[in-house]
Image (cartoon, rainbow, N blue to C red):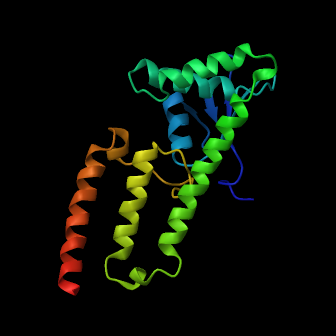
C-alpha cells in the first residue's frame, strides 16, 4: 500500500500543535485543508490518549472558512444539519450526505472516463490540454470535492490558493488557442 492509499497521520501534541508524521514537521489547519483538497485522506489523533480527533478538526476547518465569508454550506443545509442532531439516532442526514457526495464523486469520475474512453477526439492535436483544462474547470466548480484528478503529491498552484481567478483566465486562453487549432483542422 502506497502513501497515497493510507490516511496521512497527524498527531496533536499536548501543546495543541499538529505534527505531520510523514514529513516530520508541524502543520496548520490550512495545511491539512490543502492535503484534503489534493485528494489525501487525513487522520488526526491525540498523541497522549490516542483519541481520533479527525472529525473535530475537519469541522473546525469548515467553521473557519465559513467565518471568513467563504460560504461552504448554504444556510438551509446548516439548518438541516442542526435539525438532524435533534432527531433521536441522528436521523437520515449523515447517510444522505455521504450518499450524495459518493454519487457526485462517481459522476465526476464517469465524466472523465467518458472523455477518455474510445473518444475519437483523443487523437486530435491539443486534446490533452483540453482535457486538463476540463478537469481544472470541474475541480474549480466543485470546490475540489473529489480527489479523482489529483494525486497525493500534487501541489496546489497560486490560482487555486487565490480563489481560481488566474485559473479561469488560463482556461479561457487555452480554450481560445484550441478553438483556433480546431478551426484550422476543418
Asked if residue 135 lies left or right of residue 2, the reply is: left
Q: Does 124 sit above or below residue 174? A: below
Spot the residue most to the top. Answer: 86
Residue 127 visible in the current orientation: yes
Q: Does 94 sit above or below residue 165? A: above
**Residue situated in front as seen by the camera: 27 or 176:** 176
Residue 48 visible in the current orientation: no
**Residue situated in front as seen by the camera: 148 or 185:** 185
Counting from the top left corner in percent of width and height, residue 132 is at 39, 64
Asked if residue 112 lies left or right of residue 89, the reply is: left
**Residue situated in front as seen by the camera: 56 or 79:** 79
Q: Does 46 sit above or below residue 110? A: above
Counting from the top left corner in percent of width and height, residue 56 is at 66, 23
Asked if residue 50 lies left or right of residue 175, the reply is: right
Q: Does 99 sit above or below residue 170? A: above
Counting from the top left corner in percent of width and height, residue 99 is at 68, 43
Counting from the top left corner in percent of width and height, residue 69 is at 38, 22
Quarter of image, res 113: bottom right
Quarter of image, res 5: bottom right
Q: How many marks?
A: 0
Residue in the picture at 43% in, 59% down: 135
Residue in the picture at 75% in, 59% down: 1
Amino acid at each position: 500500500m502506497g502513501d497515497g492509499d493510507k490516511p496521512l497521520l497527524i498527531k496533536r501534541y499536548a501543546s495543541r500543535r499538529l505534527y505531520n508524521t510523514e514529513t516530520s514537521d508541524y502543520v496548520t489547519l490550512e495545511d491539512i485543508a490543502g492535503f484534503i483538497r489534493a485528494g489525501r485522506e487525513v487522520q488526526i489523533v491525540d498523541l497522549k490518549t490516542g483519541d481520533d480527533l479527525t472529525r473535530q478538526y475537519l469541522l473546525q476547518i469548515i467553521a473557519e472558512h465559513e467565518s471568513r465569508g467563504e460560504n461552504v454550506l448554504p444556510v438551509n443545509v446548516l439548518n438541516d444539519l442542526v435539525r438532524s442532531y435533534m432527531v433521536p439516532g441522528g436521523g437520515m442526514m449523515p447517510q444522505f450526505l455521504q450518499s450524495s457526495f459518493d454519487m457526485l464523486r462517481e459522476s465526476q469520475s464517469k465524466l472523465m472516463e467518458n472523455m477518455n474512453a474510445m473518444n475519437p477526439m483523443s487523437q486530435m492535436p491539443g486534446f490533452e490540454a483540453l482535457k486538463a483544462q476540463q478537469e481544472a474547470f470541474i475541480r474549480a466548480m466543485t470546490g475540489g470535492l473529489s480527489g479523482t484528478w489529483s494525486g497525493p503529491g500534487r501541489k496546489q498552484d497560486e490560482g487555486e490558493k487565490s480563489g481560481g481567478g488566474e485559473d479561469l483566465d488560463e482556461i479561457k486562453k487555452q480554450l481560445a488557442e484550441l478553438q483556433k487549432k480546431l478551426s484550422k483542422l476543418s
